[in-house]
Image: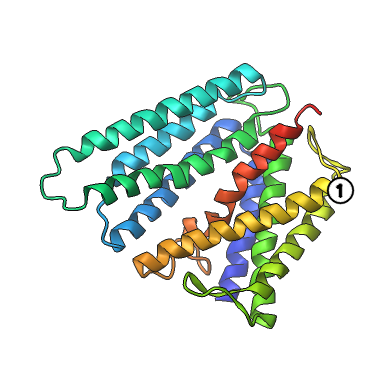
Amino acid sequence: MLKYRVISGCLLIAGLILGSFYLPAPGVGLVLVAVSYFAQREFYALAKKAGIPVFDRLGAIAGTVLITATFLAVGPAEADVARAYRWEVAVLSFSLIAVFVRQFPQKNNTMPLPTIGCTLLGVWYVPYLFNFFTRLLFSWDGARWSFSAFVSPTGRWLVLYMVAVVKAADTGAYFVGRMFGRRKLFPRISPAKTWEGLFGGIASAVAVSAAFHHFAGGRLGAIPFGLADALGLGAILALVGVIGDMFESLLKRAAQAKDSSDTVPGMGGILDVLDSLLFGAPVMFVFARWHFGS
């Protein structure tokens, strides 16, 4: 299991680096849509295993439109970012109405409220949070995407940094927990996680974040990144990553499933890979917007 986990992790990291440097912007947009789509379908599969009927096709369409709309609208100018916000609000609002209307002809559905709730949760949990990757990649450096353009240097730095720190926390928590873990964190939700693993993950994340500060010269592209930022943001990303991991563990326990799927050898499904990153991406975006131009 560990061997496949290491191999899959190395391949995913290599794919992330190669894609961020050499894949044109429309290709990156298609990858974002595809990853979100399959992760969202895994969420709906978990809901069905838990006995909750969902409108998975409608939810997946809403998620695809959400990410596509942001990709087409987002840019470095404030007006473009504001336009992306308006498109997102419109898509989410129409998704809410569409799910309500879709429920009306369900004569034999004895669980209308769980159906509506889980369908909408699938939109907010996966594509809405994952859409912050779109914002991180394409909201900087003074040039909108084009069919021949690549990811901007700032977008590349932000995503690579966030993924490295969050996954360093995952890795540190895994190994420290296995070697030294004694006190359970939340055994009802995730029996394997320990307080020792949590602190090991935070320490690993802070160390990787400090290394980024050193080697990047105190900036993440156009974003100032001081040592205090590195230490604080590293710890925060580790904590929100644990929350994301625990939330997906709660979903899997409700569905009585070990993994969201078996798509990624040694790691489970795409949602298992993304769980901590989904909560880290909005934190990273808020930090970047707060510091942009300062």
Quadrant occupied by the C terminus: top right
* Element type where label 1 sits in the image: helix
Please tell me whether residue 160 is drawn above or below residue 247 in the rendered image.
above
Q: Amino acid at mark 1?
A: Leu
- In which quadrant of the rendered view does residue 282 lie? top right
| Residue 221 placement, left or right of 179 | right
Residue 93 in picture, x, y percent from top left: 38, 29
Residue at 45% in and 27% down: 89
Please tell me whether residue 180 is drawn above or below residue 234 in the rendered image.
below
| Residue 77 placement, left or right of 132 | right
Q: Nearer the viewer, residue 237 or 218?
A: 237
Residue at 64% in and 44% down: 283
Q: How many marks?
A: 1
Residue 261 makes an appearance in the image: no
Residue at 62% in and 49% down: 280
Colour pattern of the rendering? rainbow
Q: Nearer the viewer, residue 110 or 19?
A: 110
Q: Residue furthest left?
A: 107
Quadrant occupied by the N terminus: bottom right
Residue 229 in picture, x, y percent from top left: 80, 46
Q: Which residue is mark 1?
A: 227
Q: Residue furthest top?
A: 79
Residue 37 in picture, x, y percent from top left: 42, 45
- In which quadrant of the rendered view does residue 201 lie? bottom right
Q: Nearer the viewer, residue 270 or 254?
A: 254
- In which quadrant of the rendered view does residue 207 lie? bottom right
How many residues crowd mark 1 within 10 Å: few (<14), some (14–19), many (20+)? Answer: some
Residue 210 in picture, x, y percent from top left: 83, 54
| Residue 258 placement, left or right of 135 | left
Residue 202 makes an appearance in the image: yes
